[in-house]
């Protein structure tokens, strides 16, 4: 048990109508509080063994609620404290009454993520696993959930810790070299240290290579559909979603604001945005929609640039082509069933797909092109991938190792102390990924993003 801290409580289930709701209590007074608020047959909750499920009642503000009590005893619990969970009827009124009763009996409200923070501080999980819990809760696709589960199981922690331990040994070996008098250190020793340093940097870069996939899984890819009015942008959105979400008419300028929906492609959630047609407009509302479309275009992970295949290129089309990033764009030539005047080969090397979206022709080819541009493969097995925070710390660590490598290559052995200092800094950065090195501001930043009750 983690002695010396308060007993906390919170609602652990999402708000809204449901069959049950759960109030979680964790801390040294969890079982005594359960004795005070829960009525059941003898023995009292505090006298029962771990793993007990007890039927009874909670007396709440003059009312009586049926409930089930679950008992977890330290250290075999989520927080490694004594933990009690009260399962009551779902809905807001019932569970809030139970929570108020628990707080009146001696618990204090839990802060966001405080249960998981205690799990980390007790050594039950590391920071990577703690973040995986948040990723699992927020997962918007099965692939994202599978990746989070692998991280929760410690796969990513093992990889980071392996590099960390290698650097600790490398730093120790380098500092041991300081005991030699100048000129006495064998050259092959320094050569070996340089090789080990290079190998560690390669391992870091391999770890960092998963950042883009991690970004896509966690945040979703921003896919923006742009083009002139009436080229089929809303029809494309409806085809990808498989339902009529955007209004489709023959009148140009029907879409005047951005319209966003989530669409899962090969396990990656996409933030699919239909935008106002890009043109010179007199209407203030349409002008604002066009401005928003151009702002989104700057942030897009992928742009679907649409053109009417029945018309030849004009100056507006050419202007659009000049302001896109070819490596992050798929050109969609629509309406090819009505007489095609635009050829796919005319836009080489831009990735181009010809479609007749009104009938659905070409939509599967477009999905394949989108997967290629986003570098997401349907056959890739889900695996733990790094986040923006991890990527930032890896970059810092790699920079320090690069400095150490440069020192050892360009200087004589009298500069070993400087190289050792750089390696220590790299170790510190890596330690912040898993929590082997941490400070209160780091924990506050991570756990404040959790929901209350987790």
Image: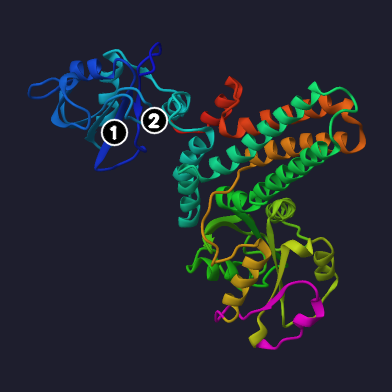
Q: In the figure, 220 relative to 191: above or below?
A: below
Classify residue 406 as left or right of residue 305. right
Q: In the image, 61: left or right of 297?
A: left
Question: Along the line of sight, which residue is nearer the eye, 251 or 127?
Answer: 127
Secondary structure beneath dot 1 equals: strand
The image shows residue 399 at horizontal and vertical percentages of 78, 37
* Residue positioned 65% across, 71% down in the render: 369
Residue sticking out furthest to the left: 41
Give residue 109's position: percent from left, percent from top. 38, 20
Q: Are marks 2 and 1 in contact (CB under 8 Å)?
A: yes
Q: CA distance from mark 2 to mark 1?
A: 9 Å
Please provide percent x and percent y for residue 324: 79, 61
Q: What secondary structure is the magenta-colored segment mainly?
A: loop
Q: Is residue 241 inside the magenta stretch?
A: no
Element carrying mark 2 = loop
Height in image: 31 above or below 16? above
Q: Residue at x 29, y 15 (%)?
A: 29
Please give the count of numbered marks on the rendered protein. Answer: 2
Which residue position holds label 2?
453
Q: Is residue 216 above or below residue 107?
A: below
Is residue 341 magenta-colored? Answer: yes
Q: Quadrant of the N terminus?
A: top left
Percent position (x, y) of residue 280? 79, 61
- Give the extent of the magenta segment: 338-360
Which mark, residue 22?
A: 1
For marks 2 and 1, the one nearer the N-term is 1
């Amino acid at each position: 048990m983690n002695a010396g801290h308060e007993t906390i409580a919170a609602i652990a289930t999402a708000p809204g109508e449901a069959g049950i709701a759960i109030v979680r209590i964790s801390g040294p007074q969890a079982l005594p509080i359960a004795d005070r608020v829960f009525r059941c047959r003898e023995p009292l909750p505090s006298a029962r063994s771990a793993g007990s499920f007890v039927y009874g009642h909670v007396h709440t503000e003059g009312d009586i609620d049926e409930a089930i009590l679950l008992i977890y005893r330290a250290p075999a619990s989520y927080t490694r404290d004594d933990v009690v969970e009260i399962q009551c009827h779902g809905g807001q009124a019932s569970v809030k009454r139970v929570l108020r009763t628990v707080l009146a009996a001696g618990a204090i409200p839990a802060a966001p993520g405080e249960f998981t923070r205690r799990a980390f501080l007790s050594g039950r999980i590391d920071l990577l696993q703690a973040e995986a819990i948040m990723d699992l809760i927020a997962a918007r696709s099965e692939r994202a959930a599978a990746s989070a589960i692998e991280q929760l199981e410690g796969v990513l922690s093992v990889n980071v810790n392996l590099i960390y331990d290698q650097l600790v040994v490398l730093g120790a070996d380098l500092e041991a070299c300081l005991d030699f008098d100048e000129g006495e250190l064998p050259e092959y020793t320094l050569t070996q240290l340089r090789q080990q340093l290079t190998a560690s940097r390669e391992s870091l870069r391999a770890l960092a290579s998963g950042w883009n996939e991690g970004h896509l899984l966690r945040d979703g890819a921003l896919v923006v559909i742009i083009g002139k009015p009436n080229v089929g942008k809303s029809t494309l959105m409806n085809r990808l979603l498989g339902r009529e979400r955007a209004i489709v008419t023959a009148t140009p300028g029907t879409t005047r604001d951005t319209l966003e929906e989530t669409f899962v492609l090969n396990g990656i959630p996409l933030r699919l945005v239909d935008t106002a047609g890009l043109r010179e407009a007199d209407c203030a509302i349409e002008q604002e929609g066009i401005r928003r479309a151009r702002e989104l275009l700057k942030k897009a992970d992928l742009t679907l640039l649409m053109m009417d295949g029945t018309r030849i290129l004009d100056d507006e089309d050419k202007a659009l082509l000049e302001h896109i990033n070819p490596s992050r764009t798929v050109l969609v030539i629509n309406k090819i069933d009505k007489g095609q005047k635009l050829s796919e080969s005319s836009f080489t090397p831009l990735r181009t797909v010809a479609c007749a979206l009104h009938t659905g022709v070409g939509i599967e080819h477009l999905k394949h092109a989108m997967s290629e541009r986003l570098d997401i493969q349907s056959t890739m097995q889900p695996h733990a991938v790094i986040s923006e925070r991890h990527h930032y710390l890896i970059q810092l660590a790699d920079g320090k190792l690069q400095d150490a490598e440069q020192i050892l290559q360009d200087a004589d052995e009298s500069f070993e102390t400087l190289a050792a200092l750089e390696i220590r800094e790299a170790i510190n950065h890596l330690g912040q990924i898993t929590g082997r090195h941490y400070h209160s501001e780091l924990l506050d930043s991570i756990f404040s993003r959790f929901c209350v009750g987790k």
